[in-house]
Amino acid sequence: MHTTVPAGADQLWAEDSGGAGPALVLLHPGVGDGRIWDRMWSDLTGHGRVIRYEVRGYGRSPAATEEYTLVDDLRRVLDHFSVGQAHLVGCSMGGSASVDLALTDPGRVRSLTLLCPAIGGYPWPDDPPELTAEWESATGNEDAMIAFYQRLWAAAGSSPEVTEQLRSAIRAEPNEEEYQRPPASPAWDRLSELQVPTVLMIGDRDRPSLIACDEEAARRIPGCRLIRMPGVDHLPPLREPDLLARTVLEHVRAAESAGAAGVAG
């Protein structure tokens, strides 16, 4: 079921598959929109309730008209669908929002599956001057920006599906820069506080700085399982949908079993 979720003065496009069992919520990356989950959707919804939504200005969500944070909008989605606790699957930007919710409102998160997450507060190195110059030269030319994003985030290859994801991100970016705000407390120095079952997946064709961030994040998160994906860039739901769906379902089942055992104990 497609619907819209009120978000302050704005709205978010969302889809709820319905079904029984704990909700699984999918959060898309900043280099794509909710369509990035299409290849996994039927596999996941065949096993229970799945919800996905799009950040303000991305895909089918109207542009923001006021300041917002990703984690507050995630709470709005959960509240709208009357979800008290959820398993979160977040890719890049969506992974960052998932971690932020698990830190600020841990009772609402049953497990985390983080796909190449960008963790707030990580000391990112400066981009090389030539990369900055290339971005500035491409700005304002959508085709040039898509080609730039292709080299930066989609090193595993181009396809019409990849191009449309990158185009969606490029069109959303100006509105995002104007209205999206970071959470009050960056997550990086608080990763050791996470107390939910966590899987972190990274591809070896992602940006080296992002790989370094995620490797260190996996070390900091208690009990985190790190999975490396050969040949995968920053778009794992497009590159390895079967592996991702299988990993998510196994992780959710394990988290549910552990929770039931804890209650019984």
Image: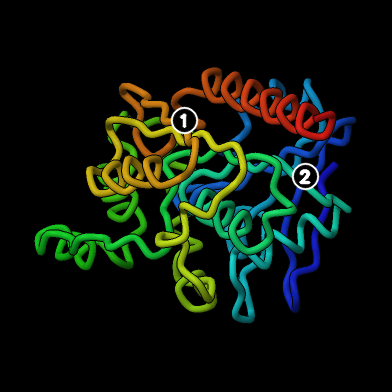
Q: Nearer the viewer, residue 152 or 83?
A: 83
Q: Secondary structure at mark 2?
A: strand
Q: Name the quadrant containing residue 214.
A: top left
| Res 168 seen here | no
Residue positioned 55% across, 37% down in the render:
198
The residue tagged 1 is 225
Instruction: Please name the colour scheme applied to the rendered image.
Output: rainbow
- Residue placed at 51% from the left, 34% from the top? 199
Residue at mark 1 to residue at mark 2: CA–CA distance:
29 Å
Tell me residue 90's x, y (percent).
Answer: 56, 44
Residue 233: mark: none
- What's the mark number on residue 15? 2
Q: Nearer the viewer, residue 219 or 209?
A: 219
Q: Is residue 90 visible?
A: yes
Q: Residue at x 56, y 59 (%)?
A: 100
Which is more toward the observer, 238 or 139? 238
The spot of residue 54 in percent (x, y) is 64, 54
| Residue drawn at x 47%, y 52% as measured from the top left | 192
Cβ–Cβ below 8 Å for labels 1 and 2? Answer: no
- Lower sequence index among marks 1 and 2: 2
Residue 39 image point, x, y percent: 60, 26
Q: Is residue 20 above or below residue 180?
A: above
Q: Amino acid at mark 1?
A: Arg
Residue lying furthest front: 265
Kind of residue at badge 2: Glu
Quadrant for the C terminus, please: top right
Position of 34 compared to 158: left or right? right
**Image x and y of residue 15, in percent:** 77, 44
In this view, the residue farthest toward the bottom is: 66
Query: Depth-wise, is mark 1 or mark 2 nearer the camera?
Result: 1
Q: Secondary structure at mark 1?
A: strand
- Vertically, is 50 above or below 32? above
